[in-house]
Amino acid sequence: MQLILILIGAFIVFILSTLTGGGASLLLMPLVAVVVGVKAVAPVMAISIGLSSTSKVAFFWRDIDWKLFAWLFPSTIIGSILGARLFASLSSDYLQILIGLLLVSTVVQFRKPSKPKFKIKAWHFAPMGLVVAFLSGLIGGVGPLMNSAYLNYGISKESLLGTRSANAIILHITKIISYAYFGYVTGEVLKYGILIGVTSMVAVYIGKIILSKMSDLFFRQIVVASMVLSGILMLWKNWDTVESLIYKI
């Protein structure tokens, strides 16, 4: 019964993830944690999102911005290895709170249709990719944290999904290898990761059909909304830590 609930949840979440440019990890993490335990969440999500990203790359291959991918490639590998290395030894609560605040602040950045004051260039994705990959390796997932950069850069909805997914494959393969090396990939982790991943591939196909009927403006609006929602979920998940910080202040 638990497995069926996870697969149904994964199907719904990955459809939404396709329509909003990411964030599946944040929505699925609590459900996966209940079944396989907190320590298994990161490797399970790495396997499942890696498979999901593979299907997105297949569907949006022609729309991938290979220039951005080239800037992201090396920093993604380095960052994810470093993050996975520290996965077992550091508390991620404060990092998740910071990321949650950054995601929520997106609503301020895109509250008006005017052009942003600072224009993102292709080379900016290298340092940003390093930081995001490190955080993803450390806490298991950071949601659509870089989507604001993609939107600022000015690519289409198909290009955003294709490029982000191509980079995600590199990110999650590196994380899986790193987690396996440090002993976190067990038989149970593989089972849940693959089952969720296969379910996500079907969900991505359904999401692609819906996405084709969606305007770029509406896509931009729901991406921003999903980032804010992801930030709120991340803060809510770590509310005990947030309260302790408030009392200290």
Image: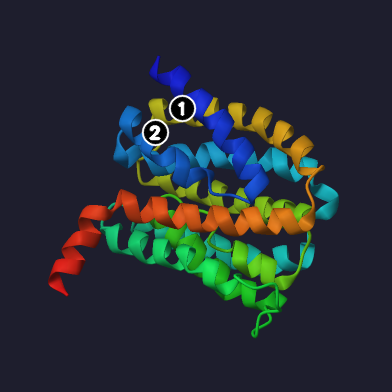
Left or right of 75 on screen, residue 166: right
Left or right of 21 on screen, residue 155: right
Q: How many badges with numbers are in the image?
A: 2
Q: Residue at x 40, y 66 (%)?
A: 101
Badge 1 vs badge 2, beta-carbon distance below 8 Å: yes
Q: Is residue 26 visible?
A: yes
- The residue carrying pointer 1 sits among few (fewer than 14), some (14 to 19) or many (20 or more) residues within 10 Å by Cα, namely many
Question: Tag 1, which secondary structure?
Answer: helix
Measure how far apart labels 1 and 2 are at the Cα level: 9 Å
Q: Give residue 212's quadrant in the image.
A: top right
The label shown at residue 192 is 1
Question: Tag 2, which secondary structure?
Answer: helix
Q: Is residue 163 visible?
A: no
The label shown at residue 3 is none
Q: Nearer the viewer, residue 74 or 227?
A: 227
Residue ranking furthest to the top: 1
Check disc 2 and give the amino acid type: Val
Q: Residue at x 35, y 56 (%)?
A: 235
- The residue carrying pointer 2 sits among few (fewer than 14), some (14 to 19) or many (20 or more) residues within 10 Å by Cα, namely many
Q: Look at mark 2 in the image and give the residue it sits on.
A: 32
